[in-house]
Amino acid sequence: MKENPVTAKARLAGRIRTASASLDTSATNLFSNVAENRTRHVVALLFIGDGTSRTIDVQFAGETTDTVLDNLNLGPAQNLWLPEGGYDVLRPIVTIEGGSRLTATQSAGSGVTVTAIYWDDTQR
């Protein structure tokens, strides 16, 4: 039987975690590799501008590196939420299997801060 969405959200609320990093022009880990027995569900990303316009790329890094989001435009005084309008714990924007991680780069300089909001699930 499928779990009621309200019940599922309440169950996951206590498992929400955050990780933040300051970006530069090389790949910056948003968090370390996900444990092998887990799946990480990233439900939101918040990018905080530092006074200069930049573009941001977000990569999934595992056995290969694939760009998940590219050329995100971030204005000088802008805060960019993905997804726009708020997040839903039942609708991750990216799911990362154990042994992999999420990285991000900015087009120039350093100083953009990104925060990932996520929850982990143990694989059975």
Image: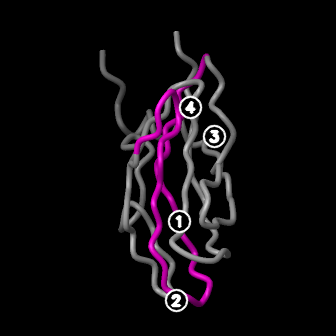
Marks 3, 2: nearer the viewer? 2
Q: Tell whether label 4 touches label 1 (CB within 8 Å).
A: no
The Cα atoms of the two marked residues, 4 and 2, are separated by 31 Å
How crowded is the residue under tag 2: few (<14 C-alpha within 10 Å), some, or many (20+)? some
- Range shown magenta: 37-66
Residue lying at 40% horizontally and 48% vertically, measured from the top left? 67
List the residue tagged with mark 1. 46
Which is closer to the viewer, label 3 or label 1?
Answer: 1
Q: CA distance from mark 3 to mark 1?
A: 20 Å
Q: What amino acid is found at the position of numbered circle 3 in the picture?
A: Gly
In front: label 1 or label 2? 2
* Mark nearer the N terminus (3 vs 2): 3
Of the pair 4 and 81, the residue shown nearer to us: 81
Q: Amino acid at mark 1?
A: Leu
Q: Can the viewer see residue 11?
A: no
Choose the circle earlier in sequence order: 3 or 1.
Answer: 3
Residue under pointer 3: 14
Instruction: Residue at 69% x, 39% y: name it.
Output: 32
Mark 4 lies on residue: 100
Query: Which quadrant of the figure contains the N terminus?
Result: top left
Is residue 52 shown above or below 97? below
